[in-house]
Image (tube, grey):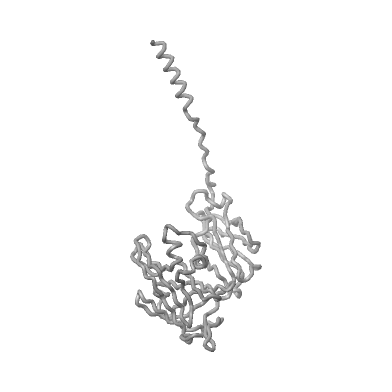
Amino acid sequence: MKKFITILLAAASLFAVSCQQKEEAYEWGPKDDANCYGVYFPAQTLPSVQDPTQAPEAQITLKRLNSNGAITVPIELKSNENVFSVGQAQFADGQDETTVTLSFPSAEDGVNYTCELRITDPAYASYYKDVNTTFKYKVMRVSWLYLGVENGKAVAVSDPAKAAKITWVQNWWGEVHTGTIKFYEVNGMRTCSTITEDVDGFWGTGNELNFKWDSASNNIYFEPQYVDAYDASNDIYMYDYYGYYNFLNSNYAGSWPDALSFFSQNPTITCSYYEDGQINLYVHYFYVMGLGGWSIQNFDVIGYVEGLSEAE
């Protein structure tokens, strides 16, 4: 019996050994160069729309963690469009911030272009520092125009001094403000932004109202709009039906690539529109991020264009 137990224990021992997983040797990542300059792209916001009268270029800011020595940083440029070129990024000894020129002289008006700048050389880019070694850029060269009025008709004017005065009535918030509208048009779609004159921004918070205006149908579409801060941690946003279903409603979120697609596929749902001198913005919902919201379901924000109060 003892011999039989010994055989069983030996077999169990062999089984345990055979079931052990072989540990693979851990491969350590590459070490940062001891003299790495730690070059990176700090947070920065560049205009994505550029007037054709401006030089076709952008100044991109770079910084570095190690400011010893004069250096020229190699920058890789990635883009599907052959319109970009990037200059040299140079730091003088002791200098920790500089700019590099991104040029796009062959960019056509009304076309969106994108590219990405990368710092990959380990002598200049850290593997482990919490900084951005890539920078994405997009630009479209197109002229800003202004909504004007000539002979009782809505027209586009290039002189901001000739822009039509617009009175905005915000029913829920009980506010009335005045200003003008600037826009650029590509393939019949006007991308509009308000220029509020009597307060800082459309809601008095420094932010203007942005929307798209289809010049053929006069339908108006807007992405969720920032309204104001609810408290120190939460913001209020304004939604139309598209914004509500495509961003807030978990059953449908992300189902449509843009507002035009949403309203085209749901023609019975109320859409914002322009008619007879009025810009009628339909508000379905006000929502406080992280807390909840309340339903409006009305043309709650209306812009009255001076000189176009009657049918055109």
Q: In the image as oriented, which residue stretches furthest toward the bottom?
A: 151
Corner quadrant of residue 73:
bottom right
In the displayed structure image, the side of residue 240 where residue 88 appears, left or right: right
Corner quadrant of residue 304:
bottom left
Corner quadrant of residue 156:
bottom right
Name the residue nearer the viewer: 239 or 136: 239
At x 52%, y 38%, the residue is 27
Name the residue nearer the viewer: 311 or 156: 311
Which quadrant holds the N terminus?
top left
Q: Is residue 166 above or below residue 83?
A: below
In the displayed structure image, the side of residue 202 where residue 215 appears, left or right: right
In the displayed structure image, the side of residue 84 where residue 17 appears, left or right: left
At x 45%, y 59%, the residue is 252
Rendered location of residue 28, percent (x, y): 51, 40
Q: Is residue 234 above or below residue 164?
A: above
Rendered location of residue 188, percent (x, y): 57, 74
